């Protein structure tokens, strides 16, 4: 069995994790460039944890400017088996009010300016994204929310836009008509890369606003989002701390196969694979590449 090491990706308003003990910082080099920030490693209870600020401390990176591949690769290199992603979002449902945490289980990716795969020409791979969220990890988050009396809804679809602008009214109404529950700018990209890295992934979508469709609420603005975001951050810290304190010592395999997502996913014949790309994939796909090479 594999020891559980949990990566926590903090989104807007969540730039540190106060519950971490035995804290140390580590700068991890990746072949994809620099991560958003250094990794902060420590423990919560008996569980090893690694915190990464998605936008960097000081919120330096826009959703389109984040080096998602470097972030996921860095977490993989330090042994992370599970990722809990904390993400601010807007809501398309009246009952999903600001302050509610939505544990989404689906993504609708509408981004277009970012890299969403580690693979490409020279080593082509196709992983399944039918069920992008690890249900056992998601269930543990829901149980922790209940234990901490944090308002939470289990299930939902996260629509991911490019940003950095908030939606127009026409866009907001269109996204709502598509059946989305919440809207954000980062979750789908991370979920795809985490699946390729064979890391179990779950998102806590923290509602800050009603986007701009709600007739009783004004257009979204940063001031309003930040106010709710700061309140959400306190609950997020308590939620993550509870999850990790209660987590088993051994990683719980994902029923949807995130632990072995690359089995039978690589299409390119070993003789036709690009050595330069294979070198970059050492952490992400080393398990299957070594198998295919017979070592």
Image: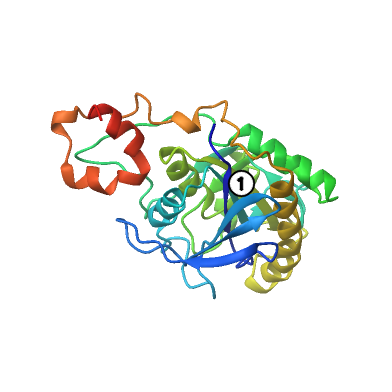
Q: Is residue 248 left or right of residue 283?
A: right
Nearest to the observer: residue 249 or residue 129: 249
Circle 1 — which element? strand
- The picture places residue 123, in percent across and down from the top left corner, at 23, 37
The furthest residue to the left: 271
* Label 1 Cα crowd, 10 Å radius (few <14 / some 14-19 / many 20+): many
Identify whether 38 is placed above or below 1.
below
- Quadrant showing the N terminus: top right
Q: Quadrant of the C terminus?
A: top left
> Circle 1 sits on which residue?
203
The location of residue 14, given as percent across then percent down, is 63, 65
| Residue at the (33%, 31%) spot, across then down | 288
Q: Quadrant of residue 35?
A: bottom left
Q: Based on the displayed image, in which of its 4 quarters is residue 272 positioned? A: top left
* Residue 223 seen anywhere in this rendered image of the structure: yes
All told, the count of numbered labels is 1
Q: Residue visible at 64% across and 56% down?
A: 43
Point out residue 263 in the picture as x, y percentages from the top left corner: 38, 26
Eyeballing the image, is 278 above or below 52? above
Name the image colouring. rainbow
* Residue 267 visible at all: no
Of 16 and 223, which appears nearest the observer? 16
Q: Is residue 74 left or right of residue 176?
A: left
Q: Position of residue 164 (x, y in %)?
A: 49, 64
The quarter of the displayed image where residue 250 is located: top right
Q: Residue at x 45, y 42 (%)?
A: 192
Q: Nearer the viewer, residue 91 or 213?
A: 91
């Amino acid at each position: 069995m594999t020891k559980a090491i949990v990566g926590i990706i903090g989104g807007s308003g969540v730039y540190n994790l106060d519950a971490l003990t035995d804290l140390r910082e580590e700068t991890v080099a990746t072949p994809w460039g620099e991560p958003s920030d250094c990794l902060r490693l420590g423990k919560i209870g008996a569980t090893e944890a690694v915190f990464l600020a998605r936008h960097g401390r000081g919120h330096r990176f826009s959703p389109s400017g984040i080096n998602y591949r470097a972030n996921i690769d860095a977490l993989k290199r330090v042994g992370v088996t599970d990722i809990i992603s904390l993400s601010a979002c807007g809501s398309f449902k009246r009952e999903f009010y600001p302050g509610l945490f939505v544990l989404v289980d689906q993504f609708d990716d509408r981004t277009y300016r970012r890299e969403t795969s580690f693979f490409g020409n020279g080593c082509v791979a196709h992983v399944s994204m039918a069920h992008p969220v690890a249900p056992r990890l998601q269930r543990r988050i829901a149980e922790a929310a209940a234990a901490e009396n944090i308002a939470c809804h289990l299930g939902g679809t996260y629509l991911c836009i490019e940003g950095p602008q908030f939606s127009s009214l026409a866009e907001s109404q269109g996204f709502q008509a598509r059946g989305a529950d919440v809207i954000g700018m980062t979750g789908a990209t991370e979920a795809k890369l985490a699946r390729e890295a064979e890391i179990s992934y779950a998102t806590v979508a923290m509602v800050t606003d009603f986007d701009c469709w709600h007739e009783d609420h004004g257009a979204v603005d940063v001031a309003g989002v930040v106010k709710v975001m700061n309140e959400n951050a306190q609950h997020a810290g308590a939620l993550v701390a509870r999850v990790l304190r209660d987590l088993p010592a051994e990683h719980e395999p994902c029923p949807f196969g995130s632990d072995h997502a690359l089995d039978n996913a690589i299409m390119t014949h070993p003789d036709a694979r690009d050595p330069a790309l294979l070198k970059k994939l050492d952490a992400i796909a080393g398990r299957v590449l070594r198998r295919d090479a017979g070592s």
